């Protein structure tokens, strides 16, 4: 497993933006895909976005399409999640994850390594 460290969470008002970062500690980090998931209070962890490490193909949940943007910096072993036009329902703990396999990128079970999570709170 790879150690993943998230940062960038915080408290914002509705309509504002945040950028989350997730950096892998491994020098030879080369996953197949990176993903962002979130877990709202009392809910199951859900898919937010994913990016294929080699070609940068991106995928989004319907609830964030058009507002969130995932990107990566291969040289820095870092994946980002730019979150714009935040809504109170985006309030959750956000986790990044890495997988070495293709397919089923919306499923938590496909991911090998997870970060510790970062809290995002959006007030109305």
Image: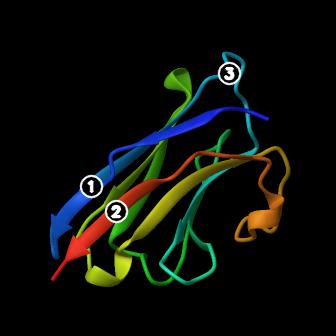
Q: How far, Cα to Cα, is label 2 from label 3?
A: 26 Å
Q: How far, Cα to Cα, is label 2 from label 1?
A: 5 Å
Question: Where is residue 105 drawn, in percent x and y?
Answer: 73, 64
Mark earlier in primary sequence (2, 3):
3
Vertical side of 71 occupied by 43: above or below: below
Position of the N terminus by quadrant: top right
- The residue that appears at 43% across and 76% down in the rendered structure is 65
SS assignment at label 2: strand
- The residue that appears at 74% across and 38% down in the rendered structure is 31
Q: Name the residue under label 1.
A: 10
Classify mark 1: residues with Cα within 10 Å, few (<14), some (14-19) or many (20+).
Answer: some
SS assignment at label 1: strand
Please name which of the two marks, 1 or 3, marks the residue nearer to the observer: 1
Q: Can residue 17 be seen in this view?
A: no
Q: Is residue 123 visible?
A: yes
Question: Where is residue 32 drawn, in percent x and y?
Answer: 76, 44
Mark earlier in primary sequence (2, 1):
1
The answer to which quarter of the image holds residue 13 is bottom left
- The residue that appears at 48% across and 79% down in the rendered structure is 41
Vertical side of 56 occupied by 45: above or below: below
Q: Name the residue under label 3.
A: 26
Contact (CB < 8 A) between labels 2 and 1? yes
Numbered circle sitting on residue 65: none
Question: Where is residue 101 drawn, in percent x and y?
Answer: 85, 50
The mark total stands at 3
Q: In this view, does 109 lie to the left or right of 95?
A: right
Numbered circle sitting on residue 120: 2
């Amino acid at each position: 497993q790879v150690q993943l460290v998230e940062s960038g969470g915080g408290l914002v008002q509705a309509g504002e933006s945040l950028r989350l970062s997730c950096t892998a500690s491994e020098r030879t980090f080369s996953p197949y895909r990176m993903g962002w998931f979130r877990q709202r209070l009392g809910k199951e962890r859900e898919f937010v976005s994913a990016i294929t490490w080699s070609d940068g193909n991106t995928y989004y949940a319907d609830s964030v399409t058009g507002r969130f943007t995932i990107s990566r910096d291969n040289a820095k072993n870092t994946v980002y999640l730019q979150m714009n036009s935040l809504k109170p329902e985006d309030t959750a703990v956000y986790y990044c994850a890495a997988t070495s396999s293709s397919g089923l990128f919306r499923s938590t079970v496909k991911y090998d390594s997870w970060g510790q999570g970062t809290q995002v709170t959006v007030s109305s």
